[in-house]
Image: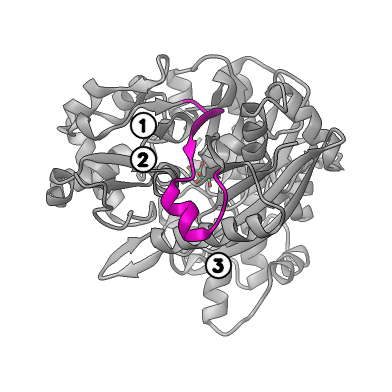
Amino acid sequence: MKKVLAIDLGASSGRGIIAHLDGGKISLKEIHRFQNNGVWAGGDFLWDVLHLLDEIKQAIVKANNDGGFDLIGIDTWGVDYGLLDKDGSLLTNPVHYRDARNAVGQKEAFDTMSAKEIYERTGIQILDFNTLYQLVYAKNHKNHVLENAKTFLFMPDLLNYFLTGVAKNEYTIASTSQMLEPHTKKWDFDLLKKFGINTDIFCDIIMPGKKLGELSDKVCEELKVKKADVIAVGSHDTASAVVSVPSDKKDFVYISCGTWSLFGTELDEPNITEEGYLSSYTNEGGCGGKIRFLTNIMGLWLIQESRRTYIKEGKDLSFADLEALARKSEPFKCFIDPDYPEFGKPGDIPKRIREYCEKTGQRAPETIGETVRCIYESLALKYKYSLINLEKITGKKFEKINIVGGGTKDPFLCAMTADACNICVDAGPVEATALGNIAMCLISAGEIKDIAEARKIIANSFPLKHYEPNHTADWDSAFERFKKILGK
Ligand code: LFR
């Protein structure tokens, strides 16, 4: 019976979870949790990657003291990267995907190739933080860094490298970069050359489920732990989350719901069409040879960042407090497009929501409860909009939405999703990302046969919460108003 240490890093916190298979169920234990905040340094918004490495080491020591482990998998958010010099040392701190420079890089990239052409080639949703645009910015403004770079690593690749000394780019995380050819699953070097990016820095791509290496002698000595295998899991957190969607159907709809809401389905092949481009559907790489056909929706970030503003103003409200205030507030007062670019930047979201409502001729929210309710309803309506587009593009009709991840702890949002979309919702598991990571480790060790079996085991291990839709005509008229705001 193999023991797994899953390291799951989100954009605001990280965890170390140990797990094993026990009588056809996965048993989990969180042994370490830590903060992961972007840090402003001299006008740059950066990741403190050495802090993350240190926390991962603490998780390794704790897991070792808790009975040991045989396999480690690391997953993180997408797109961000670090560069090594010719001696294998980190050149600079990785830049946070919410740094304002990325929008500049994107604009500059469009001088070389249009957004549509980039989408047609890569199948990836046009988001200003995609690695491609980050590299265009680096080339145009920080070229001394790129000129000294020998090796390019995404965040999980970089952390794996620190633990093993092995430098590889894992496929699912690489697919978030907008720099892969989606059919061959290889680097699109021709594309990169068009942007003048040195293609020598990229590593071999490793597929999820393969062994990447072992904890290095140095790490074992430093931490006084035994050797363990480091597995290339679906190292993009969303790829891991999709592995653990507890569905036994071939076609299913999921929302990986946390800071972001990743709304989509799994496909066998990329689906790159004009409609997909216009409705912001992406073709990210999945585990088991699948494509994650999904759209990236702003998600609970809007509530998290609003809460930070309220706390700065001296109103120390928990998420449960915010939800309670929202429940008591006037329904359907005003809506936002959650994906309006201004909402993606750190700062005073409630103020930006008020401005947005005024600009779009709506009554602006006046209280905290009204603001939070506006966010919840707008997310639920964006899910409905995304479901309609998904059914149109794929020609499939879906009967249920599986919500996985931290958002499953929010019954208000889950119920609203069912009501707005007029569809059943199954919510769970909450630990979707870590579970997908664990599942790929156990598949690589031969303890689980494949992803279908992993999904059965996960469905069997964690209870789901079921929501029946309570769809009223109010949601239909709300959706008509919402579409006008989107300009559709
Ligand atoms: C979710 C996620 C999304 C990605 C965003 C930024 O945590 O990985 O999939 O678009 O973060 O990297």
Residue 209 or residue 41, whichever sits in front = 209
Residue highlighted by disc 3: 306
Q: Residue at x 42, y 20 (%)?
A: 274
The location of residue 160, given as percent across then percent down, is 44, 44
Residue highlighted by disc 1: 178
The location of residue 369, given as percent across then percent down, is 68, 69
State whether residue 21 is above or below residue 64: above
The location of residue 444, given as percent across then percent down, is 61, 28
Residue 88 or residue 455, whichever sits in front = 88
Q: Residue at x 52, y 57 (%)?
A: 56
**Can you tell which mark lies on residue 130?**
2
Residue 278 appears in which quarter of the rendering?
A: top left
- Quarter of the figure that contains the N terminus: top right
In the image: residue 24, left or right of residue 12: right
Residues rendered magenta in the picture: 207-227
Q: Secondary structure at mark 3?
A: helix
**Mark 3 residue type:** Ser
Residue 71 or residue 16, whichever sits in front = 71
Residue 182 appears in which quarter of the rendering?
A: top left
Magenta residue check for 6: no
Distance between mark 3 and mark 1 Cα atoms: 30 Å
Q: How is the image coloured?
A: one colour
Tag 3 or tag 2, which sits nearer the N-term? 2
Please state which of the two labelled residues, at mark 3 or mark 1, is closer to the viewer: 1
